[in-house]
Image (spheres, helix red, strand yellow):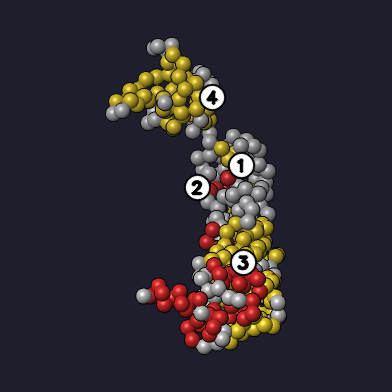
């Protein structure tokens, strides 16, 4: 019974006096275009109301247009089970559709960009300053959709200072409606250590040789040393002149063993731990992998230098 009633309703649409007056142009406020957005549906009852809600597909992207024709509307009606006669149409033969939008507050985009920078930049210095060099502008929003949500991410390689670029994607109701980019110059400020006198290659820096100063770090190459205790067990990798700002790349591990020195070897096999003595075949620093000869077996092994023992001997782990 229900099927026959629906079939009769669909078949008799043209008999119910429904007329479609197509506009020449129309603006829509949602993602999809409905027949009621682009035409005046003249008629009463359920059938007319169903036609007003007939989905004609996606609205054009903001800034663009879409043209709908009578033939195209009739195809959409046929597909949806609501066949329409050409005699029911009047007005324009096609309608130019635009999307009505509202501009997003550009300050929201800038705020999200700076929040992302604060959350994702490394800790260099004590203070950051963001200088906007490329404004993100604004994004067109759909008036009838939900509040915009902004997602920020790096655009290109991330940097902890200097010029950085971000991509900002704006969504409404879980679907992206637009994206833009922004660029900032990230300026860093903080305390660093400056040498008062030169330090030779291979030497450690003593407290009396440095002074703590405040300065801008934006154009400083390398990660600055902010505490001398971070490098007291390291040595200068090259000669450092007076006035030099200390950065971590200027230091290296001291030589742990020289070629020909004895090395305490540690073998691990499951829960078994074996100790032996070997001879370094080349010099090395902590963390390096060097060849070691085991005099007892005359085997050449590769071992990782891990530190010094209680007697000052070099300790190496055999893989």
Residue at screen point 55% across, 53% down: 226
Find disc 3 in the rendering and name its residue.
Answer: 178
Gap in Å between the C-alphas at discs 4 and 3? 59 Å
Q: Tell which of 95 and 313 is nearer to you.
A: 95
Labels 4, 3: front one: 3
Reading the image, the residue beneath label 2 is 229
- Which of labels 3 and 1 is toward the front? 3
Marks 1/2 in contact by CB < 8 Å: the verdict is: no
Q: Earlier in the sequence, mark 1 or mark 2?
A: 2
Tell whether 295 sits left or right of 236.
left
SS at mark 1? helix
Front residue (pair 126, 103): 103
Q: Earlier in the sequence, mark 4 or mark 3?
A: 3
Could you tell whether 261 is left or right of 268 in the image? right
In the rendered image of this protein, does residue 265 appear above or below residue 200? above
Of circles 3 and 2, which is in front? 3
Task: Report the Cα–Cα distance between label 2 and label 4.
Answer: 26 Å
Q: Which mark is residue 129?
A: none
Name the residue: 56% across, 37% down. Answer: 252
Left or right, residue 200 beside residue 282: right
Decide which of tag 4 and tag 1 comes sooner along the chain: 1
From the image, which quarter does the C terminus lie in?
top left
- Residue drawn at point x = 55 percent, y = 44 percent: 206
Mark 2: which secondary structure?
A: helix
- CA separation, marks 3 and 2? 49 Å
* Alpha carbons under labels 3 and 1: distance apart: 46 Å
Residue 283: mark = 4
């Amino acid at each position: 019974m229900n099927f026959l009633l629906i079939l009769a309703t669909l078949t008799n649409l043209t008999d119910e006096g429904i007329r479609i007056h197509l506009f020449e142009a129309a603006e829509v406020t949602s993602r999809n275009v409905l027949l009621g957005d682009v035409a005046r549906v003249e008629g009463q009852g359920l059938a007319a109301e169903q036609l007003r809600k007939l989905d004609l597909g996606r609205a054009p992207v903001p800034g663009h247009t879409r043209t709908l024709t009578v033939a195209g509307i009739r195809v959409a009606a046929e597909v949806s089970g609501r066949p329409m006669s050409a005699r029911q149409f009047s007005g324009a033969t096609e309608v130019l559709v635009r999307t009505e939008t509202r501009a997003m507050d550009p300050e929201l985009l800038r705020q999200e960009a700076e929040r992302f920078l604060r959350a994702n930049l490394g800790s260099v210095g004590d203070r950051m300053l963001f200088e906007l060099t490329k404004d993100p502008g604004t994004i067109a929003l759909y008036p009838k959709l939900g509040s915009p949500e902004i997602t920020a991410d790096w655009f290109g390689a991330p940097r902890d200072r200097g010029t950085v670029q971000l991509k900002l994607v704006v969504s409404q109701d879980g679907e992206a409606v637009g994206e833009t980019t922004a660029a900032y110059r990230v300026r860093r400020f903080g305390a660093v250590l400056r040498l008062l006198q030169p330090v030779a290659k291979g030497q450690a820096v003593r407290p009396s040789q440095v002074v703590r100063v405040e300065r801008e770090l934006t154009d400083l190459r390398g990660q600055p040393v902010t505490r001398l205790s971070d490098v007291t067990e390291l040595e200068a990798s090259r000669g450092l002149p007076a006035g030099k700002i200390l950065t971590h790349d200027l230091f290296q591990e001291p030589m742990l063993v020289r070629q020909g020195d004895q090395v305490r070897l540690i073998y691990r096999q499951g829960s078994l731990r074996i100790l032996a003595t070997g001879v370094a075949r080349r010099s090395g620093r902590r963390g390096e992998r060097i060849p070691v000869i085991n005099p007892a077996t005359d085997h050449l092994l590769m071992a990782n230098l891990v530190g010094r023992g209680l007697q000052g001997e070099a300790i190496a782990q055999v893989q």
